Amino acid sequence: MTATGTLRAGLVGLGSMGRHHARVLAGLEGVQLVGVVDPMGDKNGWAQGAPVLSTVEELLALGVDYAVVACPTALHEEVGLKLADAGVCALIEKPVADTVDGARRLVEAFESRDLVAGVGHIERCNPALRSLRARLEAGELGEVFQVVTRRQGPFPHRIADVGVVKDLATHDIDLTGWVTGQTYRSIAAHTVSKSGRPHEDMVSAVGQLSDGTMVSHLVNWLSPLKERFTSVTGERGCFIADTLTADLTFYSNAAVATEWEALRAFRGVAEGDMVRYAIPKREPLLVEHELFRDAVLGKSDDICTLRQGLRTVEVAAAVLESAADGRTVRLDDDAA
């Protein structure tokens, strides 16, 4: 930290996410972006004027309070361990690591040194999901019965090292546990690979959370339709969150009885009022950085911890295990 109280931050990786991290870090109040690591250089001018370095060691030599790790997933563990060894806090892009064991080693490295470390599960900072979580915590839905997510769109050419489960489904696994406050008890999944790459392109998974809530996830990068849909159904109705538009809508169960017998029989639970909430729509990545900055300063703990990131990697591994073995995989409620 500088004499003026400004945090010195570094960035590792200038790819599709790294460039956005650089933009936000360069303008983040109370933070100075002092260096960016990318062996490929900065041919696109994304480093925001910060020096571009070839190695993590060069960044550490500049002196940093924390670093954002936005390199390929397979390198997260190696880079994260270097930062932990140097006593540097870290915000690591999701998933925290490409293996369960790697994620556990990162948890141990940062926790044993009492360093602030988080995972960039950015959906936690989406305005619609933050509002949804607050409303669930306030009991507005009553008992929760089911969470359904759909995340689909065209193939992202930025991805080469992981399949759709680790790249995209980890978003839905984390947000489901986060908004409900529950952990996964079991998961069963099917996958297909159609793009000619070694990894899966589509996954359909169903499961159960620790309180009995049913979950269903449909995730793919084979669709021309881009969709980011989360619904939570409970005893008082249904919340629908669209994280592309950051809209949150509530469909309530009707309080008015229907006298039309045939219609009542057809509809079952009757439709009530629909409310679309007016919520402030700040950029999720900026919110994520503000929360992590405040966590480093000891002002807040509203981040996705490495231990929570580990749990998401464990569930993702269970999804792939289920798809490979054709069976339901049970998870230890006390894991992570």
Image (cartoon, rainbow, N blue to C red):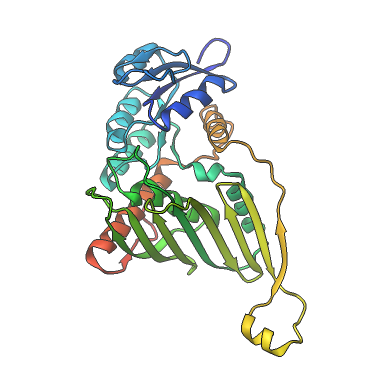
> Would you identify the image quadrant in which residue 132 lies?
bottom right
Report the residue that reaches farthest toward the bottom: 261
Residue at the image point whose x is 40% and y is 12% from the top: 51
Q: Residue 254: horizontal and vertical position, in percent?
A: 72, 74
Residue 13 appearing in the image: yes
In the image, 17: left or right of 278?
left
In the image, 72: left or right of 143?
left
Q: Residue 75: horizontal and vertical position, in percent?
A: 28, 33
Front-lying residue, 118 or 199: 199
Q: Residue 18: horizontal and vertical position, in percent?
A: 42, 28
Q: Residue 331: horizontal and vertical position, in percent?
A: 34, 61
Q: How many marks?
A: 0
> Would you identify the image quadrant in which residue 281 lies?
top right
Front-lying residue, 129 or 100: 129
> Would you identify the image quadrant in which residue 194 lies?
bottom left
Report the residue that reaches farthest toward the top: 3
Residue at the image point whose x is 53% and y is 28% from the top: 293
Residue at the image point whose x is 75% and y is 75% from the top: 255
**Is 80 rendered above or below residue 274?**
above
Front-lying residue, 256 or 112: 256
Residue 90 appearing in the image: no
In the image, 99: left or right of 268?
left
